[in-house]
Amino acid sequence: MRVVAVAGAKGGVGKTAAAVNLAMVASAAGYRTLLWDLDPQGAATHCYRARARVKGGATRLLGGKRGLDSYIRSTDHVRLDLLPADPSFRVVDTVLSSRRWPDRVIRKLLRPLDRSYDVVILDCAPGLGIVTESVVAASDLVLVPVVPAPLSVRSLEQLQAFIDEHRPGLPLLAFLSMLDDRKVLHRQVVGQLQGDPRVALSAVPVSSAVERMGLEQVPAVLASPLNLAAVAYRRLWAEVEDRLDLDAPSGSVIDLTGPAAPSDGSARPEAPLLSVDQPPVA
């Protein structure tokens, strides 16, 4: 089992969109996948049409007296399960700080699931606190969305410093999120990050298909499979898969590039790589 944390110091950069779509792509690729929503807003939970309620709340879930399997729910999609969040997750920092080894809690909770899942994706709330420390200790890769803006790039460096302090050597893969090549600042930041080995080649453009996920409650890779953002998420998963050195999946592959046409008119065969030589995106 491999654990991927979608994390960052800054909010509003597309963490949940990435977690929701990558979980769908991973399961479609044949991997038994668990998406764990750790954000008290429960956006990932909402996107998969689940009720944002955990019996006993964060205190009981993180207490370790019951296994995570008792809280996991199936989704409408084969090989994809969900561990939902609810508003009680606002106190996760407090709950963890009361434990003797707070940085080991998430890793210990995930360990019994090793034979049940190939991939676990953690949708983390923004910040660099005790929860992030526990997530970093449990993860095999930290995936970081970066909006092409100076403050978002700065938050990437803050997270890198946090990882270097708490778990040196843990792989970090950043990717440009909500990219709009029509903006001069975005093009400047792309140029600044080109050549950085931490940054994925795949960049996710700003897209109405992603924005509609909260309304439609369907991952963009399913609702608009030919949309630029959907194609970018599939490419990004290929890079994540390579970094994790995953074994070949045992499940059958589901085609996410089927005949469904994107509803926002952005049907194009290619998604942007890390480049400033791209046309405006829809």
Image (cartoon, helix red, strand yellow):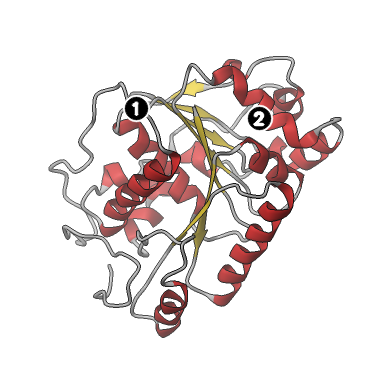
| Label 1: element kind | loop
Left or right position of 207 against 125: left
Left or right position of 114 against 213: right
Left or right position of 222 against 213: left
As drawn, the label of residue 107 is 2
Residue located farthest toward the bottom when viewing the structure as drawn: 184
- Which residue is rendered at x = 55% and y = 34% of the image? 36
- Label 1 sits on residue: 77
Instruction: Give whichever of 266, 196 is nearer the camera.
Output: 196
As drawn, the label of residue 96 is none
- Residue 166: x and y, percent? 73, 48
Q: Give, as a three-letter code, the residue at label 1.
A: His
- Residue 125: x and y, percent? 63, 48
* Label 2 close to label 1 by CB (< 8 Å): no
- Residue 123: x and y, percent? 55, 43
- Which residue is rendered at x = 35% and y = 41% of the image? 218
Residue located farthest toward the left when viewing the structure as drawn: 259
Q: Give, as a three-letter code, the residue at label 2.
A: Arg
Instruction: Give whichever of 43, 124 is nearer the camera.
Output: 124
- Which residue is rendered at x = 64% and y = 16% of the image? 67
- Which residue is rendered at x = 39% and y = 81% of the image? 183
Task: State which mark lies toward you, 2 or 1.
Answer: 2
Q: Is residue 271 above or below residue 104?
A: below
User: Which badge, 2 or 1, comes first in the chain's sequence?
Assistant: 1
How crowded pointer 1 is (Cα within 10 Å; few <14, some 14-19, many 20+) is rated as few
